[in-house]
Amino acid sequence: MNRAPHLIVLTLTVAALLSAGCTFVKLSPEAEATRVVPTDRVADCERLGSTTASMAERIGFIKRPPERIEQELEHAARNAAADMGGDTVVPRGEITDGKRTYDVYRCLR
């Protein structure tokens, strides 16, 4: 009996399950101090623009946990904010199809 196809399927399944729990987007050193805050906390800040972050909601046939997607979207937005000279991001709307737009601000001087 040839077990190779079963071994391949098992290996791919385990890899997908393990990667579903991993964070793919790492914070850059510059973005570590960047904050995610609600709209009411940026009244005295300078708006620099916006960025849209997107992440895969599935890896193969495995649906990724919503909290992991949200964390990665925030990491991507914080990285983009740091690149723009910002230190604060505000999520705009809900996550839709693995995407969310964030407004970028400079608040800390």
Image (tube, rainbow, N blue to C red):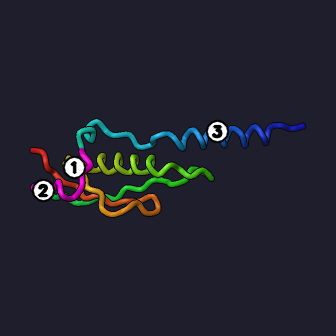
Query: Which residue is rendered at x = 37% and y = 55% of the image?
Result: 53
4 left or right, relative to 35: right
Residue type at the position of mark 2: Glu
Mark 1 highlights which residue? 88
Q: Is residue 48 above or below residue 29?
A: below
**Gap between marks 2 and 3, in whole Å?**
46 Å
Q: Is residue 54 above or below residue 31?
A: below
Query: Which residue is rendered at x = 44% and y = 48% of the image?
Result: 67
Looking at the image, the residue that sits furthest to the right is 1
Decide whether residue 90 is among the magenta residues.
no
Decide whether residue 37 is among the magenta residues.
yes
**Gap between marks 2 and 1, in whole Å?**
10 Å
Mark 2 highlights which residue? 46
Where residue 99 sits in the image (x, y, percent)?
41, 59
Residue type at the position of mark 3: Val
Where residue 4 sits in the image (x, y, percent)?
80, 38
6 left or right, relative to 33: right
The earlier-in-sequence mark between 2 and 1 is 2
Residue type at the position of mark 1: Thr
> Which quarter of the image is occupied by the N terminus?
top right
- SS under mark 3: helix
Q: Quadrant of residue 9?
A: top right
Task: Characterize the local packing of mark 3: few (<14), some (14-19) or many (20 or more) Cα atoms within 10 angstroms.
Answer: few
- SS under mark 1: strand
- SS under mark 2: strand
Q: Is residue 2 above or below residue 65?
A: above
Mark 3 highlights which residue? 14
